[in-house]
Image (spheres, rainbow, N blue to C red):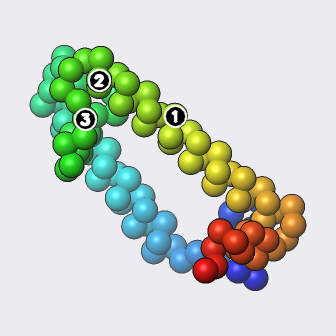
Amino acid sequence: SGASPSVLNGGLDKIDTDYWVIVAAIAGLAELANKETKEAKGKKYIPGDCGFDPLGLMPEDKEGMMAMQTKEIKHGRIAMMAILGYVVQEALYRAPVTAETPIFFKP
């Protein structure tokens, strides 16, 4: 059908079990890395700071860091709402979101 597998339109049962095992393993590795970072930084640890900043975009000053973290949270929430919109659209119209809004997905 072309629809993305989701809880609302079904299809999650068609995804291979190996995929879910790999996803769980990667999530576990991320949690272990976060735990190590938390232990290494001690009291300087900030929740969510996994030490991943390959482009060096995080400001060094406290005010800049708080502003950047606020931006990250807001953008993450907007992205989650966008994905939820796709899921709801596919569930309501029973058609892939790429077919309903081709202007965004086809040249």
Q: Nearer the viewer, residue 11 or 106?
A: 106
Q: Which residue is mark 3?
A: 58
Viewed as shown, does residue 41 lie left or right of 105?
Answer: left
Cα distance between the residues tagged 2 and 3: 8 Å
In which quadrant of the rendered view does residue 35 lie?
Answer: top left
Q: Earlier in the sequence, mark 2 or mark 3?
A: 3
Mark 1 secondary-structure assignment: helix
Cα distance between the residues tagged 1 and 2: 15 Å
Q: Nearer the viewer, residue 84 or 42?
A: 84
Viewed as shown, does residue 90 lie left or right of 32?
Answer: right
In which quadrant of the rendered view does residue 93 lie?
Answer: bottom right
**Residues under numbered marks 1 and 2 in contact, where contact means CB atoms less than 8 Å apart:** no
Q: Position of residue 83 (x, y in %)?
A: 63, 54
Residue at the (79%, 71%) spot, across then down: 100
**Relative vertical location of residue 2 with respect to residue 104 in this rendering, above or below:** below
Residue at the (47%, 72%) spot, across then down: 19
Mark 1: few/some/many CA within 10 Å (<14, 14-19, 20+): few
**Relative vertical location of residue 7 with respect to residue 54 in this rendering, above or below:** below
Viewed as shown, does residue 11 lie left or right of 68?
Answer: right
Q: Which residue is mark 2?
A: 64
Of the residues shown, which amino acid type is indicated by label 2?
Answer: Gly
Q: Quadrant of the C terminus?
A: bottom right
Q: Is residue 35 visible?
A: no
Q: Earlier in the sequence, mark 3 or mark 1?
A: 3
Q: Earlier in the sequence, mark 1 or mark 2?
A: 2
**Relative vertical location of residue 17 with respect to residue 66 in this rendering, above or below:** below
Residue at the (32%, 44%) spot, across then down: 31
Of the residues shown, which amino acid type is indicated by label 3?
Answer: Met
Mark 2: few/some/many CA within 10 Å (<14, 14-19, 20+): few
Q: Which residue is mark 1?
A: 74
Q: Position of residue 60 (x, y in %)?
A: 18, 26
